[in-house]
Image (cartoon, rainbow, N blue to C red):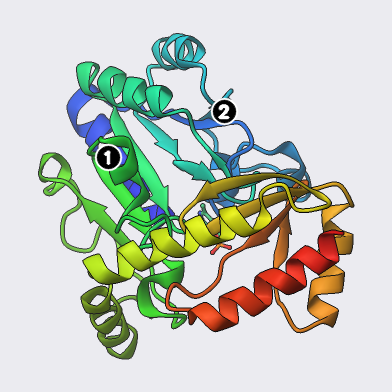
Amino acid sequence: ANECAIKVGRKYAADKKGSGCYTVITLENSFHGRTLTTLAATGQEHYHELFQPLTPGFVSVPANDIETLKKVAKETNAAAVMIECIQGEGGVLPLDAQFVKDVRTFTEENDIIMIVDEVQTGNGRSGMLYCYQNFGIMPDVVSTAKGLAGGLPLGATLISDKCKDVLGFGDHGSTFGGNPVCCAAAISILKRIDDKLLSEVKEKRAYIEKALEGAPGVEAITGMGLMVGIKTKKPAGEVVAKCMGNGVLCLTAKDKVRLLPALNIPMDVLKKAIETIKDACR
Ligand SMILES: Cc1ncc(COP(=O)(O)O)c(C=O)c1O
């Protein structure tokens, strides 16, 4: 999905502004995937080391610093800006709301394509269908995957009116793309992400925050909806190992314990899991 999003950004720019306009600005600490191009987009050097040379034409700038982003975009004649509204692998860190709005205003004013990577944040995870909706913006291109087909492998790229004719027949596709079984699963999932489910996601978030805030060994809760980061006094890996030993699967994201439960997790299961996590943090 991100490969497709980047191709749309680059082709739009090449068609409109010429072949010298191709740079994609991403954010430091971002994560956009493991192909050579999405590794290049990923603003974390340690992911790059083993796979040089990566696809050229990617520059990362600090998150939440609009002036540097504008400066670098001008210097590099940027084609696109690509962000995650909540940096997931980077530590479950939501971007500042004003920064996201400023990126949208700047990209719109300069006819630069704004891509939002919703691979992890999309499909109800943040309490809205797409996380960008929490920020009151409308991107040009959105990529999504993970929860889209309820665990079956499917990615999708949503393309706004402005970019709808950028890719022509045969410009993008893949052998297994659009698999009918996975698409049927996605149709079923999307029908079930309704207002009721989304408000349940928000209620479950409120429950998790209330249960964990101030609990022994818990320093902070980050993220949105059911994308939860827990900053713990103990090393996150230690907490995750203890949780796993007691039947709760969670993972780390940098220095945080990360929870990404199923959006429809029953309340009694969630309560039990949170008690296990609290116990592991102590
Ligand atoms: C924000 C984001 N984008 C893209 C990806 C896709 O990564 P992969 O190439 O491993 O499917 C991920 C996976 O964790 C992600 O969190």
Q: How far apart are the two marked residues, 2 and 1, measured between alpha carbons? A: 20 Å
273 on left or right of 191: right
Would you name the residue on which mark 1 appears? Answer: 11
Local crowd at mark 1 within 10 Å, few (<14), some, or many (≥20)?
many
Residue 216 spot, x, y in % from top left: 82, 52
145 on left or right of 94: left
Of callouts 2 and 1, the N-terminal one: 1
- 261 over 213 or under it: above or below: below
Q: Quadrant of ligand 1?
A: bottom right
- Residue in the image at 47% along x and 64% along y: 204
- 238 over 66 or under it: above or below: below
Local crowd at mark 2 within 10 Å, few (<14), some, or many (≥20)?
many
Q: Amino acid at mark 2?
A: Ser
* Quadrant into which the N terminus falls: bottom left
Which of 120/133 is in front? 133
- The answer to whether one can see residue 251 in this image is yes
Would you name the residue on which mark 2 appears? Answer: 60
Q: Amino acid at mark 1?
A: Lys
- Residue in the image at 51% along x and 17% along y: 65
Which of 21/198 is in front? 198
Residue 261 spot, x, y in % from top left: 55, 71
State the SS at label 1.
helix
Residue 120 spot, x, y in % from top left: 48, 58
State the SS at label 2.
strand
- Residue in the image at 48% along x and 14% along y: 72
- Where, by quadrant of the figure, is residue 168 drawn? bottom left
Residue 230 spot, x, y in % from top left: 69, 51
- 175 over 67 or under it: above or below: below
